[in-house]
Amino acid sequence: MKNISELISGTIWNIELSTSGAIMAIEIRDEENKKVLFSIYDLEKEEWLWKNIEFEEAWWINLLAIDEERLYLNYFTDEENPQSKKIIVVDIETKEVVNELNEFKEFEKNKLLKLPFHYVEGSVNFDKVAHFVEQHCADKTVKAIDYLQTHSAIAISYYIYNEEELVNFLLILNLEGEEVEREKLGEGLSKVGMQTFFQVNNCLIAIKNKIELKIYKL
């Protein structure tokens, strides 16, 4: 399994996919310098179209959506009053603002996007998967599990305790149940996340420690 890793210069705050699922936009927030950066990755060509692009508004801006040709960004007032001031439309190729909108109509959800099932501790499905993880990895799973079976792999995101803190692992197996990857996605956690990975087309995508993009080619 091919594994693509990319360290990001800031906290990965949001990810949006184009309608085809071929292009992925990433919102990166740099708390220390109070600026927001945007990167765009082509999942099919395996190359960056943008890296760490900034706009006139440095901080009060966030990612709304992306299509095959344009990026949609929201300028807002402040964190306590996140009212939209305007929506700018940016041409991906030229990186130029080509339009401003007063409102944004949500795109149709990407039908190729697959999110994992989220099982909480105590449920029947949690117990089944947790038992498998314990047999396979000798890890005592707690709190919650994200589970997804794709056309060629099984992905399980699970948590264990390290003293009083949580550690999150991503386990990827082939359909025969043989381990392909086992990655620590986070540690020192106080709570579990929801949908800690997702699949689009032939890619499984996860975020490690909020600063590293992980792409597994299925």
Image (spheres, grey):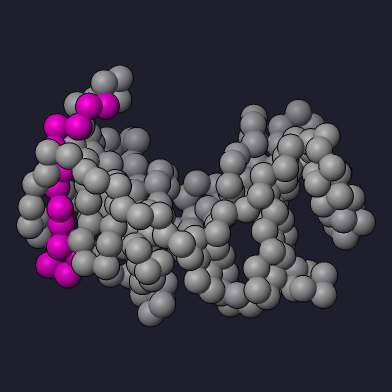
Q: In this view, does 88 lie to the left or right of 142?
A: left
Residue 85 in magenta stretch: yes
Residue 25 in magenta stretch: no
Q: Where is residue 32 in the image (x, y as percent from the top left)?
A: 33, 35
Q: Position of residue 122 (x, y in %)?
A: 83, 34
- Quadrant location of the C terminus? bottom right
Q: Is residue 41 left or right of residue 200?
A: left
Q: What span is colored magenta in the figure? A: 82-95
Instruction: Name the residue located 28 percent from the left edge and 37 percent from the top edge.
Output: 33
Q: Can residue 57 be seen in this view?
A: no
Q: Nearer the viewer, residue 105 or 65?
A: 105
Residue 66 in which image quadrant: bottom left
Instruction: Name the residue located 24 percent from the left edge and 46 percent from the top edge.
Output: 105
Q: Residue furthest top?
A: 80
- Quadrant location of the N terminus? bottom right
Q: Where is residue 140 in the image (x, y as percent from the top left)?
A: 86, 44
In the rendered picture of this protein, how many numbered marks are placed on residues?
Answer: 0
Q: Is residue 49 left or right of residue 215?
A: left
Q: In this view, does 99 lie above or below 143?
A: below
